[in-house]
Amino acid sequence: MILGLDTSALLQRYTGGPYSAAVNTAMAQAPQWAVSDLTRTELVMALHRVSPDPVTAAALTAAARADLDAMLIVPLDSRCLGRAVELGSLYGLRTVDAVHLAALDRLPRPLQLATLDARQIPAAVALEMELVTPTEGAGEFPLPT
């Protein structure tokens, strides 16, 4: 089983957000992690934005880069971007969400998707991705509103 992660889920891991324990548990239980190539850029930029100072930003970025080195990084090429157009048009996704899902759609099933972004859920379900979207108190992610 591969666990695909989007940036919203990974941010929880490094920032100690309210769902960080659930993300960490999901990652600990998965034998393989995967992200789109876009996630690297998005994640590092987001960590710099949320960090209170450069030292914290450097520490969070180092932790993220160590994890990224252990992940399957799905490349973005013209085929992936073409699929993103299809998914974005069909499901009304934002470009970034369509790109993440198109990249992860290239992976074999069974595939889990950890996300805190409810906009991705209808497309992920249609793509036969098993959602890791737990509920509060049960060690799972709540679906954002």
Image (cartoon, rainbow, N blue to C red):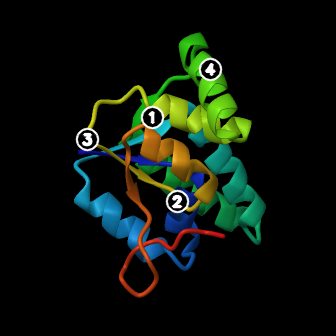
Q: On the image, numbered disc 3 is attached to which residue?
A: 110
Give the foreground label among 2 and 1. 1
Q: How many C-alpha atoms fall within 10 Å of the one at disc 4: few (<14), some, or many (≥20)?
A: some
Element type where label 3 sits in the image: loop
Q: On the image, numbered disc 2 is attached to which residue?
A: 9
Q: Amino acid at mark 3?
A: Pro
Q: Residue at x 45, y 34 (%)?
A: 104
- The Cα atoms of the two marked residues, 4 and 1, are separated by 12 Å
Q: Is residue 3 left or right of residue 119?
A: left
- The Cα atoms of the two marked residues, 2 and 4, are separated by 22 Å
**Viewer can see residue 68:** no
- The Cα atoms of the two marked residues, 3 and 2, are separated by 19 Å
Q: Position of residue 16 (x, y in %)?
A: 54, 75
**Dot placed on the residue nearer the N-terminal end, 4 or 1:** 4
Q: How many C-alpha atoms fall within 10 Å of the one at disc 2: few (<14), some, or many (≥20)?
A: many
Q: Position of residue 10 (x, y in %)?
A: 52, 57
80 or 67, nearer to the observer: 80
**Dot placed on the residue nearer the N-terminal end, 2 or 4:** 2
Q: Position of residue 64 (x, y in %)?
A: 51, 53
Element type where label 2 sits in the image: helix
Which disc, if any, is residue 104?
A: 1
Q: Is residue 94 left or right of residue 82?
A: right
**Dot placed on the residue nearer the N-terminal end, 4 or 3:** 4
Q: Is residue 77 left or right of residue 51?
A: left
